[in-house]
Image (spheres, rainbow, N blue to C red):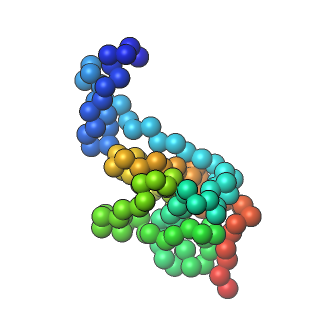
């Protein structure tokens, strides 16, 4: 890409370059295994997008439960933190990550979601 094409206009989760082409916001994904890297970090916030019942059965240690449907209620997170989203299988977390990147956040989406997680920070309620 030439230097004069690098200016972008943000619109509806896309960027439009100077040539009028739509470009998706870059969404960074991480493996479920990599999720353990963010557990306990003061510069990261892990968001579990699953329903409350699923969260209470089991979740990643330190994750905050914000069911995906509730994100529409104007949730705001600390902008200085990396926001790591996970859901059941990865689709909702990708959509949430894309939306929050559009709002100016640093995000990650977990590929495969909670179903793929086998890490050491699993919390299971009995």
- Of residue 98 and residue 44, the one placed in the foreground of this image is 44
Q: Residue at x 31, y 25 (%)?
A: 7
- Looking at the picture, how far across and down is residue 54, in whole percent? 54, 74
- Looking at the picture, how far across and down is residue 82, in whole percent? 51, 52
Would you say 22 lies left or right of 61 here?
A: left
Q: Is residue 91 visible?
A: no
- Relative to residue 13, is residue 4 depicted above or below? above
> Residue extending furthest bottom?
126
Q: Quadrant of the N terminus?
A: top left
- Looking at the picture, how far across and down is residue 53, in whole percent? 51, 79
Q: Quadrant of the C terminus?
A: bottom right
- Of residue 25 and residue 44, the one placed in the foreground of this image is 44
- Of residue 86 and residue 84, the one placed in the foreground of this image is 84
Number of numbered discs on residues: 0
Q: Residue at x 63, y 48 (%)?
A: 31
> Residue extending furthest top?
2
- Looking at the picture, how far across and down is residue 115, in whole percent? 62, 61
- Of residue 113 and residue 19, the one placed in the foreground of this image is 19
Q: Residue at x 32, y 38 (%)?
A: 14
The image quadrant that residue 77 belongs to is: bottom left
> Residue extending furthest right?
120
Q: Is residue 111 visible?
A: yes
Q: Residue at x 56, y 68 (%)?
A: 63
- Relative to residue 4, is residue 122 depicted above or below? below
- Relative to residue 17, is residue 27 depicted above or below? below
Would you say 7 lies left or right of 126 here?
A: left
């Amino acid at each position: 890409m030439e230097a004069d094409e690098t200016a972008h206009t943000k619109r509806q989760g896309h960027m439009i370059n100077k040539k009028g082409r739509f470009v998706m916001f870059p969404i960074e994904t991480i493996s479920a295994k990599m999720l353990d890297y963010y557990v306990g970090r003061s510069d990261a916030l892990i968001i579990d997008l699953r329903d409350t019942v699923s969260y209470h059965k089991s979740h990643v240690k330190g994750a905050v439960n914000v069911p995906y449907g509730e994100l529409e209620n104007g949730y705001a997170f600390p902008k200085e933190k990396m926001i790591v989203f996970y859901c059941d299988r990865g689709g909702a977390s990708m959509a949430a990550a894309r939306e929050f990147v559009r709002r100016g956040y640093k995000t990650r989406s977990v590929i495969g979601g909670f179903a793929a997680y086998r890490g050491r920070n699993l919390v299971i309620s009995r």
